[in-house]
Amino acid sequence: MQTEPQPPKGAPDEQAQSHVLDMIGTAAKSLQEPVEKTDCKIETCALNFYYGDFQALHNVSLHIPARRITAIIGASGSGKSTYLRVLNRMTDRTPHTRVEGEIKLNGQNIFDQGINTIELRKRVGMVFQKPNPFPKSIYDNVAHGPRVHGVKDRQTLTELVEKCLTQAALWDEVKDILKTPATALSAGQQQRLCIARAFAVEPEVILMDEPCSALDPISTRKIEELMLELRQTYTIVIVTHSLQQAARASDFTAVFMMNDQRGGELVEFGTTRQVFTQPQHHQTKEYVAGDFG
Ligand SMILES: Nc1ncnc2c1ncn2[C@@H]1O[C@H](COP(=O)(O)OP(=O)(O)O)[C@@H](O)[C@H]1O
Ligand SMILES: [Mg+2]
C-alpha cells in the first residue's frame, strides 16, 4: 500500500502561522514588535455572571494591562459584551442579574459597598457598537459629561471640547459647525464624537463594544489609528468580531468561547502576536484559522 509522503512535523503549523501573518498584512509589522508588560489595570478573578438562571460567564480570570489595548475576540454569544458591561457595572441596570467573583480596578474591588457607580462609569467609560450621540449639538454632546460633573466655566468647557474633539481626530471636520445637531454627522463622525464624549470626563479606561461594526473602512481605520495613539494614556478594551482589527490594533488578545452549557468562558489570553501565531488552545487555532485560512 502506498502512503502519501508526510510533511515534516510542525510544518503545517508554521505554514499556518506565516499565512496568518500574510493575511494580517501591514499589521504583521506591529505584531512583531515586542509588547512591554505594564502593571495590571483591571484584575478579574473567578468571575461568574448570571442572567436569571442562565450563567453567561464562567470563572473568568483575566488581567488587563494598563495603557495597552486589549482585544476580546471569540464566538458570538460567548459573553464578550456581558464581560465588558460588567467592567463598569452597566449590567447593574439589567434586572435579575447576579455576579460572583471580583473585579479590581487599581486594586479596589468595584463591587465593594460604597462604590459609587456614577463615579465608576466616569473612570471606566464606554463606546457602543452603534454610534449613540445625544439629540444635541456637537458641542453639547462633548460638554455634557463635564457639565454633569460640575464644570460650569464656559472658557474651560470650550477648551475641553476642542481638546477632546482633537483627540478623537474630529476637530478639523467640525470646528466650524459646533452648534449643528450631532445627528447630522456621518456614522463614522458620530462614532468619533462618541469617543470624544467618552474622553471628556477624563476616564482611565475606555471600553469599546464593536465600535467599528457600523462604519466604512476609512472611518474604521481612523478609529484604529486613534486607539493606537490613545493607548499611551488610556487603557482600552475592545470587543471586535474582526480578527484583522484585533491583529492591527491591539497589544493583547483575550479569546472567549462557549462551553458545553452554552455559557461563556475565557480560553486564552496573551500578546496579540502570540495568540495569532502560536495559539495554545485548539478552539483559538480553529477560530483564527477559520477567519484567515
Ligand atoms: N439582557 C439579557 N438577558 C438574558 N440573556 C442575555 C442578555 N444579554 C445577553 N444574554 C445572553 O448571554 C449570552 C452572552 O451574550 P453576549 O454577552 O451578548 O455575547 P457576545 O457579545 O459574545 O456575543 C448569550 O447567550 C445571550 O443570549
Ligand atoms: Mg456582543
Image (cartoon, rainbow, N blue to C red):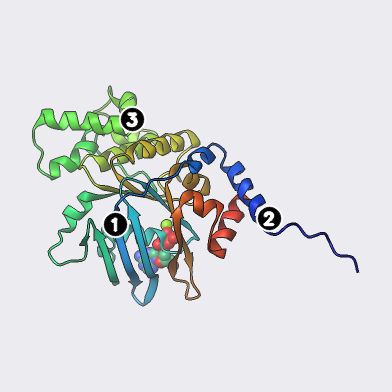
Q: Is residue 264 above or below residue 21?
A: below
The label number, if any, that marks residue 12 in the structure image: 2
Q: CA distance from mark 3 to mark 1?
A: 29 Å
**Which residue is under mark 1?**
42
**Which residue is under mark 3?**
170
Residue located 55% across and 55% down the image:
278
In this orientation, which residue lies closer to the viewer: 101 or 168?
Answer: 101
Q: Using a 10 Å C-alpha cutoff, classify the residue at mark 3 as few (fewer than 14 neighbours), some (14 to 19) or many (20 or more).
A: many
x, y (%) of residue 195? 31, 40
Does mark 3's beta carbon lie closer than 8 Å to ligand 2?
Answer: no
- Please give left or right for residue 224 compared with residue 114 in the image: right
Q: Is residue 238 above or below residue 152?
A: below
- Pick whichever of labels 2 and 3 is earlier in the sequence: 2
Q: Amino acid at mark 3?
A: Leu
Q: CA distance from mark 1 to mark 2?
A: 37 Å
Q: Is residue 257 visible?
A: yes
Does dot 3 land on a helix, a strand or a loop?
Answer: loop
